[in-house]
């Protein structure tokens, strides 16, 4: 990997992704294997006059051993010093950069019940951090970087080095980096394109969407009252612009929790609990999943749906043209950051308060009146196809075609 491209990627993640501010703390969370990129991001953040950059490395193989051999009680412990550390970062108004490169299927043999118990405990312990990011109290960003385990899953017929290089090349394509372009300018233009789509959708102020394709998806999805479409650049509570996902192609908003009916069929596998859920569908009635099935890893799907009360309802609907840079690679990345941005998707679990107009300062009880869903999880799954059609219906009965043959019509 060329050092110049690595540094350019770091610049994009730090300057446009989290958009670190002078005097702010940056927390970088990443696998051991991506230390080279983490160090580049650290340097870039200090050049931007960050107060402090803390790199926290994760070892997924050690984590697998821990999940296999440690007791549930030990795995669910949350020491006081960890709680104090979390609150310290929140009180400091920190920014966080996640470099996500999980090996798909690595945890497939871990006991599903044990995994579910641990995940629920972790979600509860980290709820203040979850709320901090979901409500955009500070800037946050997720990027990815190729590791051998992930690259070999995507390109199993290539040797390690070639698989990693090919995945790296495709990652650079999806985030619009090449040797010579002005990456800051490119992303400013991309964000403007997404903002234009959001404005059109917001101006219509749809009551509900009808979503259909040949896989069997046939869904009537009401949108939250006073909903807002967003995507691309967002703003923190302090008004700082940042990009939560890189790459990103989505325009997303909030479904009305109890007003979703019909069937949705997943168009791509979902990597959840270290397991690949494949060929699955969900049936909704009054917003809740009432039936589901999967050809592979149905137990993992069950654990997601039953994670808590809110995880059986939707928190997000996102629209992405099938004709997009990620989709056009023709690659299944086995990584939600990429696969969700190659396809229209829904999310089971918590909604984003920012998708309600004037949500700042509103209590949860007030948000519920608009159709807000609360959960300790938020998991995207993909349903977009080349023949997807979406029609929006306004409150005054106007019918507007939004998608035809998988793409935006405007």
Image (cartoon, helix red, strand yellow):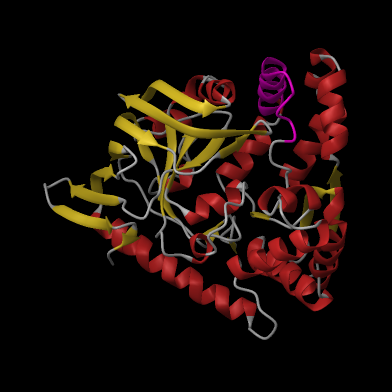
Residue at x 67%, y 19% (from the top left corner): 112
Left or right: residue 30 compared with residue 401: right
Residue 174 in which image quadrant? bottom right
Residue 109 inside the magenta-drawn segment: yes
- Is residue 60 visible in the rendered image? The answer is yes
Task: Name above or below for residue 47 compared with residue 33.
Answer: below
Front-lying residue, 79 or 146: 146
Residue 275 inside the magenta-drawn segment: no
Q: Quadrant of the C terminus?
A: bottom left
Q: Position of residue 296 (x, y in %)?
A: 56, 28
Residue 283 in which image quadrant? top left
Q: Main secondary structure of the magenta part?
A: helix
Q: Quadrant of the N terminus?
A: bottom right
Residue at x 40%, y 28% (from the top left corner): 282
Q: Position of residue 181 (x, y in %)?
A: 63, 84
Left or right: residue 309 compared with residue 335: left
Q: Position of residue 160 (x, y in %)?
A: 81, 56
- Is residue 79 visible in the rendered image? The answer is no
Extent of the magenta region: 106-124
Front-lying residue, 354 or 263: 263
Task: Name above or below for residue 173 compared with residue 356.
Answer: below
Task: Name above or below for residue 160 compared with residue 335.
Answer: below
Residue at x 37%, y 51% (from the top left corner): 228
Q: Position of residue 17 (x, y in %)?
A: 64, 62
Residue 177 in which image quadrant? bottom right
Instruction: Identify the residue at the far front of this view.
Output: 157
Residue at x 86%, y 46% (from the top left corner): 57
Front-lying residue, 324 or 163: 163
Left or right: residue 53 compared with residue 391: right
Task: Name above or below for residue 217 compared with residue 136.
Answer: above
């Amino acid at each position: 990997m060329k050092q110049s491209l690595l540094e350019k990627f770091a610049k994009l993640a730090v300057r446009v992704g989290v958009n670190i501010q002078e005097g702010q703390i940056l927390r970088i969370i990443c696998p051991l294997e991506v230390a080279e990129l983490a160090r580049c991001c650290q340097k870039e953040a200090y050049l931007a006059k960050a107060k402090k950059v803390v790199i926290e490395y994760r070892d997924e193989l050690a984590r697998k051993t821990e999940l296999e051999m440690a007791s549930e009680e030990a795995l669910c412990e949350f020491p006081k010093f960890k709680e104090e550390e979390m609150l310290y970062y929140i009180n400091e108004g920190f920014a966080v950069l996640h470099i996500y490169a999980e090996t798909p299927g690595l945890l497939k043999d871990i006991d599903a019940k044990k995994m579910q118990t641990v995940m629920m405990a972790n979600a509860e312990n980290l709820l203040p951090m979850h709320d901090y990011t979901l409500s955009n109290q500070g800037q946050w960003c997720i990027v990815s970087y190729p590791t051998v385990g992930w690259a070999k899953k995507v390109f199993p017929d290539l040797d390690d080095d070639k698989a990693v290089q090919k995945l790296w090349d495709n990652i650079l394509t999806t985030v619009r980096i090449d040797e010579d372009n002005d990456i800051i300018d490119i992303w400013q233009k991309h964000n403007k394109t997404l903002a234009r789509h959001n404005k059109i959708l917001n101006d219509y102020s749809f009551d509900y969407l009808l979503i259909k394709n040949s896989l069997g998806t046939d869904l009537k999805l009401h949108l939250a009252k006073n909903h807002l479409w967003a995507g691309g650049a967002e703003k923190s509570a302090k008004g700082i612009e940042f990009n939560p996902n890189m790459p990103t192609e989505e325009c997303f908003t909030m479904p009305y929790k109890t007003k979703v009916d019909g069937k949705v069929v997943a168009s791509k596998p979902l990597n959840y609990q270290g397991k690949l859920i494949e060929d699955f569908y969900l049936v909704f009635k009054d917003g809740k999943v009432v039936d589901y099935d999967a050809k592979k890893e149905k137990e993992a799907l069950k654990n997601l749906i039953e994670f808590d009360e809110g995880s059986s309802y939707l928190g997000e609907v996102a629209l992405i043209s099938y004709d997009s840079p990620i989709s056009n690679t023709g690659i299944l990345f086995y990584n939600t950051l990429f696969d969700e941005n190659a396809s229209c998707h829904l999310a089971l679990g918590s909604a984003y308060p920012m998708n309600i107009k004037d949500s700042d300062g509103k209590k949860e009880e007030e948000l519920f009146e608009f159709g807000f869903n609360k959960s300790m999880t938020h998991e995207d799954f993909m349903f977009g196809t080349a023949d997807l059609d979406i029609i929006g219906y306004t409150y005054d009965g106007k019918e507007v075609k939004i998608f035809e043959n998988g793409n935006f019509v405007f």
